[in-house]
Image (cartoon, grey):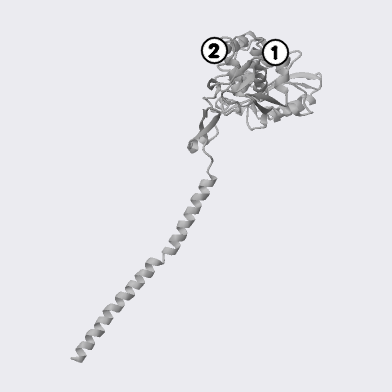
Amino acid sequence: MYKLVLGALVSLLLIVTPASAARAQSGTAAGAPNKPLVKKSRAVRKAVVRRKAAAPRPTPRRVLTLGHKSKEVYQRVAGAARRAVMSAGDLAGLNLTRDPLDLKSSVAFVLDQSNSQVLFEKNAGIALPIASITKLMTGLIVVQAQQDMNQVLTITDDDVDHEKHTGSRLRVGAHMTRANMLHIALMSSENRAASALGRNYPGGLPAFVAAMNAKARELGMNDTHYVDANGLSSRNVASARDLAKLVVVAHQEPLLREYSTDPKSVVEAGGRMLHFSNTNYLVASPDWDIGLQKTGFINEAGRCLVMQAVIQGRAVVMVFLDSKGKQSRTADAGRMRKWLEALKPEGM
């Protein structure tokens, strides 16, 4: 009997021991991958944080103006939409045109102001979006209409950019003289100021745009058409040849010469003193003698620049459209100046 009980106990121990061992092994096997699994999870979390930190900030969808405060509303943009937008010149293949100076502008035109001799041209007869070069015609209409420059104008919601959603330091409700509006529109390319100038023309903005187009026809600018006063619309188009005609006429107006070439200025807007700088840094350079200038940029137009300058005693008009790179238009002006300086007098 004793042997039977002893045998039963041994058998029971043999059964329980493997089960316990199996459970221990199972626990070890289950626990073994836990460490690398935790490490992997932390690594994944770190990678996600890094990706979020490196991700580009979403572009503003629109700017809401509430009273005296502006708020940017953001939205995520798909990767394809974030790629650089092709300009109208690119779509037309103008960027494939080569020239002896290796200009970064798809369009270039240089004219001797005294005798209208063409010194250089590249795709100069093709109408393209001109962005804020539009404001040069805006200024011409204002000064030739002999409107009161001391009249105080007010920025309204109608002057807010609802097309490209660009910002402005001129708040809705800000007051400023017409002279100051014209000053910062030409010098700093202030869009709301240019819009206000057009709105405060007899007959409002539609009459102002009609006057712009009528003046273009009067000057023989047959490739030119305007739809607004600030150039934010890509439907404002002109050829480089046309813009050279505009520069020649605009240069005859002392106020346009002064305001467009002023390096910086402080103007009063609604009781605040605002500092503005010229969008063309060349006006402050002692190496340049610039009599009139205007810059422009929207994606459809690329970087644009028109200038009247004196080079070795010769007054010339330069036009550069659809330039690639932030400083490329002024760099092209420098290349053109060196080329003109190297020409012999009879060659010029």
Q: Nearer the viewer, residue 181 or 26?
A: 181
Residue at 43% of width from left, 60% of height from top?
37
Q: Residue furthest left?
A: 1
Whichever of labels 1 and 2 marks the residue nearer the N terminus, that label is: 2
Note whether residue 272 is visible: yes
Residue type, mark 1 in image: Val
The residue carrying mark 1 is 249
The x, y position of residue 275, in whole percent, is 68, 29
* Amino acid type indicated by mark 2: Pro
Dot 1 crowding, Cα within 10 Å, few <14, some 14–19, many 20+: few
User: Would residue 251 be found to the left or right of residue 20 on screen?
Assistant: right
Callout in the foreground (1, 2): 2
Pick the front one: 157 or 209: 157
Q: Quadrant of residue 131?
A: top right
Residue 237 is at least partly visible in this image: no
Element carrying mark 2: helix
Q: Tell me residue 45's x, y (percent).
A: 47, 53
For disc 2, the marked residue is 206
Left or right relative to 340: residue 325: left
> How far from the left and from the top, in percent, is residue 303?
63, 27
Residue 307 higher or lower than 62, as above or below: above
Cα gap from disc 1 to disc 2, whole angstroms = 23 Å
Query: Which residue of the protein is positioned furthest toward the front in this rendering?
Result: 271
